[in-house]
Amino acid sequence: MMKGLLRVVFVLLLASLFTSLGAIAQGYPAKPVRVVIPWPPGGSNDVVGRLVLQKLSEWTGQQFVVDNRAGASGSIGSDVVAKATPDGYTIMIHSTTHLGNAHLYKKLPYDTLKDFTGVALLSAQPGVLTVHPSLPAKSMKEFIALAKSRPGQILYSSSGNGSAPHLQMALLISMTGINITHVPYKGGVPQVAALVSGETQASFATISTVVSHIRNGKLRPLGVGSARPSRALPGVPTISDSGVPGYEMAPWIGVFAPAGTPKPIVGRLNAEINKALAQPDIVQKLENQALDPLPSTTEEFNARIKTDYEKYGKLIKLTGAKIE
């Protein structure tokens, strides 16, 4: 008799719990949501974020307000979110740089894995290996052969130590055994300018930053770092398909929330974001920026965070890059 009564009470409590969780998701958001983007306005994180957030504001009836908190490769804004109340009203849009910072900086005021939860992926930022036309290499195989015949002589530019272009090239070096010389610059603009001028001879860069130079013949593309070719560069193969089997490294942009944010709220955000990424106008606008939409479940995104965290850690250790 008592066991039966306890079982009934347990079932009722469980039903009540699921009802309350559903109510949390259904009632969210009940006020404006602050979205920290730890980069200046106008960059890829900002552009992608605002496109998607506009849809979320329209559909939910609440404003998703962007708060650009730039500085220290995104770690200043990340700290704001790590310390925010985990109620769904402070979230963050950040890139794979968030993972790299954990290995680059000697000490951060937060734990990259423990203090955040992944909400949803937004887009991939495929990189393309490009060379100056003066370099006599018109394919990945020719580039690798040339680099091996000129150890240390080819200069490659990046946007800084530990940056995505630096790590993309570090992966290529580790997989091919080539010896080329790194020249770090302070940002993507001087990095690309050095390549266009011939100051350096090779570089990885996001497609959107070099596509105009490729089209006017100032740079030559050899291969894209993603798993599939880019629509923005028709005819340019993947690096994996053109001489380095298994090569894949495509930085991404995603949405994070403070650890402990209720799962129903995370799930609601994930569903709305994926819905936005499926809208034809969003897809077209992202493609215009040479960015690929990346719909995902929260489980898929969090699994990728862990995998890429380890991958970036190994590459940064390989480069020896450190920031005090």
Image: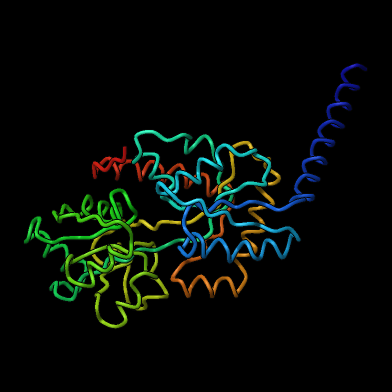
| Rendered residue at 88%/26% (across/down) | 9
Residue 317, image quadrant: top left
Q: Percent x, y for residue 320?
A: 24, 41
261 left or right of 192 in image: right
Number of labels in the image equals 0
* Quadrant of the image containing the N terminus: top right
Residue 240, image quadrant: bottom left
Q: Percent x, y for residue 135?
A: 14, 72
Q: Percent x, y for residue 146?
A: 11, 65
| Rendered residue at 35%/75% (across/down) | 211
Q: Residue furthest right?
A: 1
* Quadrant of the image containing the C terminus: top left
Q: Nearer the viewer, residue 198 or 123?
A: 198
Q: Residue furthest top?
A: 2
257 left or right of 110 in image: right
Height in image: 234 above or below 265?
A: below
